[in-house]
C-alpha cells in the first residue's frame, strides 16, 4: 500500500504560520512510513486551502497513492489513530479523521514540538473542542474525488471544511473519527475565523448544508465550479 502525505502551505505576513508548519512537518513525517511527502500551493490569490488540498490529492494520485493523508500545516495526529485511519480507509472507501478531540497549543508549546512528547504537550493546550471538521483527512484518492473534492470558490477557511463534510456524508457516507487527539500548532488565527467569514463563503456553505443528504442538489452545486 502506497501512502502519500500532503501538506498545503503558504506563509502569512507575520511569519507565524512558517513556525507552525516547520514544527508540524517535523513531527508528522515520523508518525508513519510515508512513501512521499508533498507540500503544495495552488497559486490562487487569495490563498485557497480548498484548491491546494485538491492539488495535493491530484499530485498524490499521479504518484500512485493508494491512500492520501491531507494534512493541514498546523495539525498533528497521534501515531496509532493515524495508522488505523490509513489501514481502514484503504479498505472501506470512507473519509477518516485520525482524532475525535482537537487541542490548540500556546506558542511556547508549539516551539517544543519535536523535543517534548506529544502527550505532555496536551497539558499545555489553550483550549479543547470536539471533533474538528477538518485538520486531517485520510482516504483513497478516488474517494476524495467521489466527495466532489473541496470547493475552491471559498476564500476563507472553515466554511470549506464544513461544506466538504456535508458533501462527503451525502455522496460517500459518514466520515469516521478515530479516538485520539489532534494537536494544532499555534499561529495567528485572527483572519479567516468564523467571526469574519465573508458573506459569499457563508452563502455558499449554507447552500451545501441545504443540500445535505440530497445527492442531486449536491452534485449540482459541485458542477457549478466547472460551468
Image (tube, helix red, strand yellow):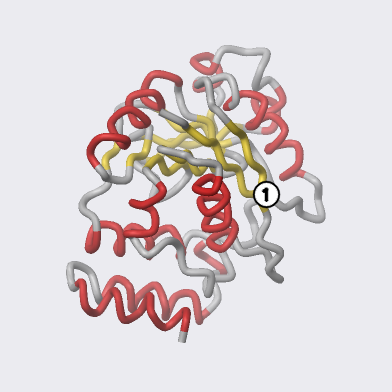
The crowding category of the residue bearing disc 1, from other C-alpha atoms within 10 Å (few below 14, some 14 to 19, many at least 20), is many
Furthest residue toward left: 213
Residue 41 placement: quadrant: bottom right
Left or right: residue 172 versus residue 149 is left
Furthest residue toward bottom: 227
Residue 207 sits above or below residue 75 on the image: below
Provide residue 196's location: percent of width, then percent of height: 57, 69
Left or right: residue 69 versus residue 185 is left
- Give the camera-side residue of 59 and 46: 59
Provide residue 149's location: percent of width, then percent of height: 42, 61
- Give the camera-side residue of 167 and 62: 62
- Give the camera-side residue of 74 and 96: 96
User: Residue at (45%, 23%) from the top-left corner?
Assistant: 78
User: Residue at (75%, 36%) from the top-left corner?
Assistant: 19
Provide residue 159's location: percent of width, then percent of height: 45, 65
> Could you tell me which secondary element the residue under label 1 belongs to?
loop
Across the whole image, how many numbered discs are drawn on residues? 1
In the rendered image, which residue does mark 1 sit on? 9
Left or right: residue 127 versus residue 162 is right
Classify the position of the N terminus by image quarter. top left
User: Residue at (52%, 20%) from the top-left corner?
Assistant: 33
Provide residue 135's location: percent of width, then percent of height: 48, 44
User: Residue at (53%, 29%) from the top-left corner?
Assistant: 125
Amino acid at each position: 500500500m502506497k501512502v502519500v502525505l500532503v501538506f498545503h502551505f503558504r506563509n502569512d505576513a507575520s511569519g507565524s504560520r512558517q513556525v507552525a508548519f516547520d514544527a508540524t512537518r517535523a513531527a508528522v513525517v515520523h508518525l508513519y512510513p510515508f512513501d512521499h511527502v508533498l507540500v503544495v500551493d495552488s497559486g490562487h490569490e487569495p490563498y485557497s486551502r480548498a484548491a491546494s488540498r485538491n492539488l495535493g490529492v491530484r499530485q498524490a494520485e499521479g504518484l500512485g497513492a493508494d491512500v492520501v493523508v491531507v494534512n493541514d500545516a498546523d495539525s498533528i495526529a497521534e501515531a496509532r489513530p493515524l495508522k488505523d485511519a490509513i489501514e481502514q480507509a484503504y479498505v472501506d472507501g470512507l473519509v477518516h479523521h485520525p482524532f475525535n478531540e482537537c487541542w490548540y497549543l500556546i506558542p511556547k508549546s508549539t516551539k517544543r514540538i519535536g523535543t517534548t512528547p506529544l502527550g505532555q504537550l496536551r497539558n499545555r493546550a489553550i483550549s479543547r473542542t470536539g471533533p474538528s471538521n477538518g485538520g486531517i483527512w485520510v482516504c483513497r484518492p478516488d474517494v476524495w474525488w467521489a466527495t466532489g473534492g473541496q470547493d475552491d470558490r471559498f476564500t476563507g477557511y472553515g466554511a470549506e471544511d464544513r461544506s466538504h463534510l456535508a458533501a462527503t456524508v451525502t455522496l460517500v457516507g459518514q466520515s469516521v473519527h478515530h479516538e485520539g487527539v489532534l494537536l494544532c500548532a499555534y499561529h495567528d488565527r485572527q483572519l479567516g475565523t468564523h467571526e469574519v467569514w465573508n458573506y459569499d463563503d457563508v452563502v455558499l456553505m449554507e447552500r451545501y448544508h441545504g443540500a445535505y443528504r440530497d445527492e442531486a442538489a449536491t452534485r449540482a452545486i459541485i458542477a457549478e465550479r466547472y460551468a
